[in-house]
């Protein structure tokens, strides 16, 4: 039972354009969402997060949007840079779960120069 | 600030052998996690420690996996005996307790079971 789904295993974008990575969840108890970025042979690193009381959070080139009614969130990267090429994991948690994270399967983003 | 340290980086063993992984979390982080990441999947939580106590080990295959966090600092994860399906990256992560969901991950141990 996948509670967090990233249906696109890969995405290629031209440098300078917008990258949009999508994530869907099924557990209505999730109230906090995070994006992690992972380079090869490294552990995931935290990128940006959003609470369920918000619908948007922005940090520099990265913006996360949350649509609670659709149980959908997306990560926008503008403008995309070659250094953004990595696997991006969506994760979710709820206050009743000891704050454990449930991860999606990841999307490999490739930014072409 | 030093990050989460894990060793070894790579390990190749044959099925039915045993293996152990070590993790040293960020200093002062009370919560420590072990995750298993199979190729093409997201990290899956195996066990969560709060100081030296277990918070959740419901997804740990206890017939073959064991973990401990003596003295509430570093931790070891052991597999005995290993199966082919245990081939994965084993990630250790730590965080401050108190609702901080931002985890800091180590680089992981790549385990191949032949």
Image (cartoon, helix red, strand yellow):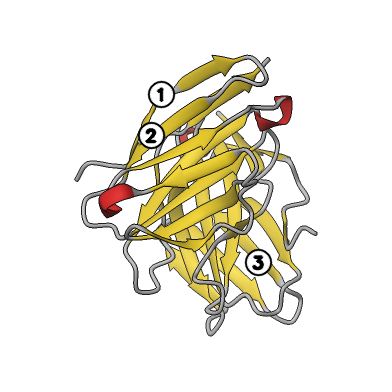
Quarter that holds the C terminus of chain A: top right
Task: Determine which residue is flagged by label 1.
Answer: B8
Crowd tier of the residue under label 3, counting other residues whose Cα lies within 10 Å: few below 14, some 14–19, many 20 or above = many
Where on the picture, by quarter, is residue B75?
A: top left
The residue at 58%/46% (across/down) is A88
Viewer-proximal residue among A22 and B26: B26
Q: Quadrant of the N terminus of chain A?
A: bottom right
Marks 2 and 1 sit apart, C-alpha to C-alpha, by 7 Å
Q: Secondary structure at mark 3?
A: strand
**SS type, badge 2:** strand
Q: Name the mark nearer the viewer: 1 or 3.
A: 1
Query: Disc 3 is attached to a residue of which chain?
Result: A
Q: Nearer the viewer, residue A25 or A82?
A: A25
When the figure is inspected, residue B7 is found, relative to residue B114, above or below; the finding is below
Q: At x 45% / y 54%, what residue is drawn?
A: A47
- In terms of depth relative to the viewer, which is nearer, A96 or A105? A96
Chain under label 2? B
Q: Which of the two discs, 2 and 1, labels the residue nearer the N terminus? A: 1
Q: Is residue B70 left or right of residue B105?
A: left
Q: Which mark is residue A73?
A: 3
According to the picture, the residue beneath numbered tag 2 turns out to be: B22
Horizontal side of B26 relative to A95 (left or right) equals: left
Q: Position of residue A44 (x, y in %)?
A: 48, 43
Asked if A24 appears above or below B27 in the picture, the reply is below
Q: Which mark is residue A57?
A: none
Residue B52 seen in this snapshot: yes
């Amino acid at each position: 039972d996948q509670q967090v789904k990233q249906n696109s295993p890969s995405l290629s974008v031209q440098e300078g354009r917008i990258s949009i990575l999508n994530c869907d969840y099924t557990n209505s108890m999730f109230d906090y969402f995070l994006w992690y970025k992972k380079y090869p042979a490294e552990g995931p690193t935290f990128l940006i997060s959003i609470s369920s009381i918000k619908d948007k959070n922005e940090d520099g080139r990265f913006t996360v949007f949350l649509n609670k009614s659709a149980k959908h969130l997306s990560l926008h990267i503008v403008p995309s840079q070659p250094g953004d090429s990595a696997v991006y994991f969506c994760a979710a948690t709820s206050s009743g779960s000891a704050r454990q994270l449930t991860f999606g399967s990841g999307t490999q983003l490739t930014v072409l120069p | 600030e030093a990050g989460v340290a894990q060793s070894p980086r790579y390990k190749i063993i044959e099925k039915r052998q045993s293996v152990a992984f070590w993790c040293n979390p960020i200093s002062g982080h009370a919560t420590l996690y072990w995750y298993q990441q199979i190729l093409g999947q997201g990290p899956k939580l195996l066990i969560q420690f709060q100081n030296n106590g277990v918070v959740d080990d419901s997804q740990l295959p206890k017939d073959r996996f064991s973990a401990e966090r003596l003295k509430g600092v570093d931790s070891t994860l052991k597999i005995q005996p290993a199966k082919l399906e245990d081939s994965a990256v084993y990630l250790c992560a730590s965080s401050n307790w108190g609702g901080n969901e931002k985890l800091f991950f180590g680089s992981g141990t790549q385990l191949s079971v032949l």
